[in-house]
Each structure stands twice: as structure tokens, then as C-alpha cells.
Image (cartoon, rainbow, N blue to C red):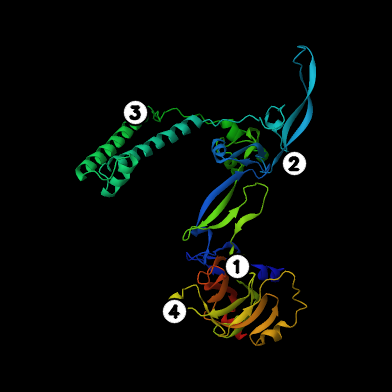
Amino acid sequence: MDVINEIFATNKVLYQCACGHCKPLTHIYFCRYCLKMRCKDCVYHEVDSQYCQHCLEYIPTIDAKLKKNKCASCFQCPNCMHTLTPRTFLASVPSETDPNGMTTRKAQFLLCSYCKWSSKDVGIPDQFIGSGGWPEIEAPNRKRVEGLVDHYRVIAQRERMEKEKKRINPRPGHAIHLLDKYGISASLSAKLTESLRTKAYSGRISSNYLSASKSLTDIKLEPSLATDDVEPLDVDTFYNKDLIESEISSIEQRLMQVEMQPNTVSQFYPISKMLYVKRSLRCKECDHNIIKPEYNSSSIKFKIQLSAFYDIPEVKIASTPKLIPHKESMVELTFKNPYQYGMHVCLQPLKDEEMDESITGKIILPKAEFILECKDDTLEPELDSTQKTRYNDDPQLITFRRGNKIGLRLTVIPEIDSGRCRVCFRLRHDFVNSVVQNKSTGGSEPQVSWISHKIYVDLGPVIESKESIA
């Protein structure tokens, strides 16, 4: 099991992003327009749609804000956080036509199929409608919180207006814009143009300021007053009664209901499901979309999917070497081409100014350039035995070649006596851009560019000197 975890571990090989962060290949995106790798910290995040993960209902952004980003018909259990399921049963209720008679109607209650918690345990009335309609619990300090939010919004608006008032004298470059806006010809004299521009701008600022000031004075906030009254301590509850852990809520359960923070299990209330977001990612440099999902809530496809896992060669550690301090060790790395075109790949050492303290080993790289075949799902690599003879591979360097994947045997020298050995090199390869076409040929052929990536490889712990002597 440890061998499998070592092979499929993604944090052993890290790629350096354009912003300098090191991430696994599965966590990095590749922009085909500026030919740079991007992580989640160096892209713009834009919200495309909001939906409920349980019922897959699409909710517009305006409705989501009004509902506090919560689904009105889906709830989760306050005890174990699993999804609550509505259960239907027949209930006897007073008849609407006969005052003394009873009738049977379908009613619903919420039940957790995992811990068997139900809405009947806390006395929530059953519902007689098809879906939804469950009563919403109101936070005790809701009005006070809303008042504080409105008060600070007024303060922010007042500060914004003060900054706008200080800019009454605009820059000379704004004169043409104001004259065009109000339909005044720019061929007037400079004196008349300046006076009209100043009057129009100052009048607009003063009118906006006066109207906003009147609206700001209408909002008043009651100040908080400290009182000397302190609630008496309930001695029987905290000292005389036995503590029953099953009736007291945990910290996690209280934080799931921040508005109420129930102390006991009897005060639990169903929690509305939070909405999920489908977001698109945009490159900060060229402003092109890197990730663009479908608007349909049930669709898992992408309109645009520019992940680095589909374009950049994947590097993995094939075998864990036995590292001895200051001695040569052999390590086998695998290189895989996930792209639809073949690649010419070469490995380059780092320059002196690119070295950092995290690099604790030296790796000897080959000067030769090797070829990675394109990805072909119909190819059977086990039966293709002609690849070695076709490319005339050096058996001392290339250990195997199967389809779009090869193995390289490299020499590593740890430069520390103890700790983890970490090496770094540059992977340089050509990239056939099927999105951006070559302008020199009139846009009929795809553009071919050479790009390089800085890769960190964690080879594992170094055997200490005492063990190596023994």
C-alpha cells in the first residue's frame, strides 16, 4: 500500500506557476493565449451561476442574495450534518366543513436517514403542502445586526461623497467629455467652454451631495447602553444536576447555527442548505477565459477547460531511490505527453540566480533531446514494441517507451547529511497551439512555440551517515 501511495502522490512533483507558487500539475491551469501556467491565486474568479447541490435548482443571483445564499426547500441535519429527507404520512386533522368531525390529510416531516433525527423531536409542526413552507426561525439580534449594517453603510457612503466633493475641479481632459455629454459643440471659445464645464460639474456634485445628505440624516442608530443588571447564575443547572453529554450540543453543532447557537439538543432546528457556485476563471494578463462551465446545474461539462493536466507533460517518480549523502544515486522519472500533438522535450539545469534554499540535491541532466508521442486512446502500448527501434533510444538513459510515456534514468547527488532531498530542473518543450493560429502563414496553420517550466521533485529522505557506514 505504501508503494502505491508513493507512486500516485501528487505533492512529490511540483510545478512553479507564473506568480511563483509551486503546485501539483492537477491544481494548475495553462493559458494557451499567453502560454503561461496559472494557479487559483493568479486568475480572476467570476461567478456564473448559483445552484443547490441537492435539488439541482438554478437560482438567479438576485434571489440568492435575498435568500442569504440558502436553498428554501433543502435542509441538513443539525445533529450530524447529513441531508434531511421529507417523509409523508397520514394525519388526522379537524374537518373544514364539519366542526366536530375529523378528516385525513397527507402531512410531511423532516427525517435524517443517518442519525434518525426528525423535526418532531423539537416540536416543529408538520407541513401539509407539497414542498417547502417550513417556518424560518428568526435570530434574536436580527434587528440590531441589520441596524449596524445600515449604519456602517451610511458611513461608507458619506466618506465616498466627501472624496467626490474634493474633486470639484476636474482635470482639463474631462472638458470634451462633458461637452459631448450635454450636446455642446467643442468649437466654442475656451472661456465659455471652461465656464460651462465648471458650472455643469459643480451643479451635479452639489445636487447629488444635498440629496444624499438628506437621505443620510433620516437613518439613526440607537447607541448601545451598558447596564448593571447581570443574569443570576443557575446553580442547579451547572452544579447540582448530572451532566448528560447526549443532551448538550458540541462546538461544531453550535457554529453550524451561528444565529441561535443552541446549547442543548432540544433547541436544534433544521439548517438550510448553502448554495453552490459555478465559477469561471479568467487570466489576469491576457483576460481570456481559462475555465468556463455550463450554466445547467446538472451538467458537469465545461465550455472551456484549459487545465495544465491536458497540455503540459506530466512528471512522476517511477521508483524511490536509496539516497546516501554526497554520493551518486539513480532515480527513474516518467514523462507523459497528454496532448494531441507530439512533443520534443529537453531538460535544462537552473542558473545560479534561480537556485533557492529549498533545493538540497544536485541532479545530472542529459543534453540530448527526446521525443514524446501524442496521446492516442486507440493505441495498445503493450503490443507496440517497435518504438525503441524507431527512435533509436539510448538504453542507459531511456528505460522504457510505451505509447506517449517514457522513463528516464537520472543521477542524483544529495548535498545534505539528513533530511529530504529536493532537486529542481527546467522542462522545455514545444507546444502546438491549436487555439491561436500562426499569423505569418495567414492563419492557416497552428502556432508552434517553445515553453519551459520550473519543476521541483521531492525524492524522499536521505539516509544518515551512521546508517550508510553500517
Disc 4 is placed on an element classified as helix
Mark whose residue sits in front, 3 or 2: 3
Mark whose residue sits in front, 3 or 4: 3
Q: Which residue is mark 1?
A: 311
Disc 2 is placed on an element classified as loop
Q: Residue at x 57, y 56 (%)?
A: 291
Q: Which residue is mark 3?
A: 214
Tag 3: amino acid: Lys
Badge 2 density bin: few <14, some 14–19, many ≥20, Cα 10 Å: few
**Lower sequence index among marks 1 and 2:** 2
Report x, y in % for residue 371.
Answer: 62, 80
Locate the N terminus and report the quarter of the image it occupies.
bottom right
Badge 4 density bin: few <14, some 14–19, many ≥20, Cα 10 Å: few
**Lower sequence index among marks 1 and 3:** 3
Report x, y in % for residue 4.
Answer: 70, 69
**Lower sequence index among marks 1 and 4:** 1
**Lower sequence index among marks 2 and 4:** 2
Q: Which residue is mark 4?
A: 352
Rendered position, 402 above or below 96? below
- Quick check: marks 3 and 2 in contact, CB under 8 Å? no
Q: Residue at x 59, y 36 (%)?
A: 263
How far is disc 3 from disc 4 in space, using C-alphas? 65 Å
Tag 4: amino acid: Asp
How far is disc 2 from disc 4 in space, using C-alphas? 61 Å
**Front-lying residue, 25 or 338:** 338
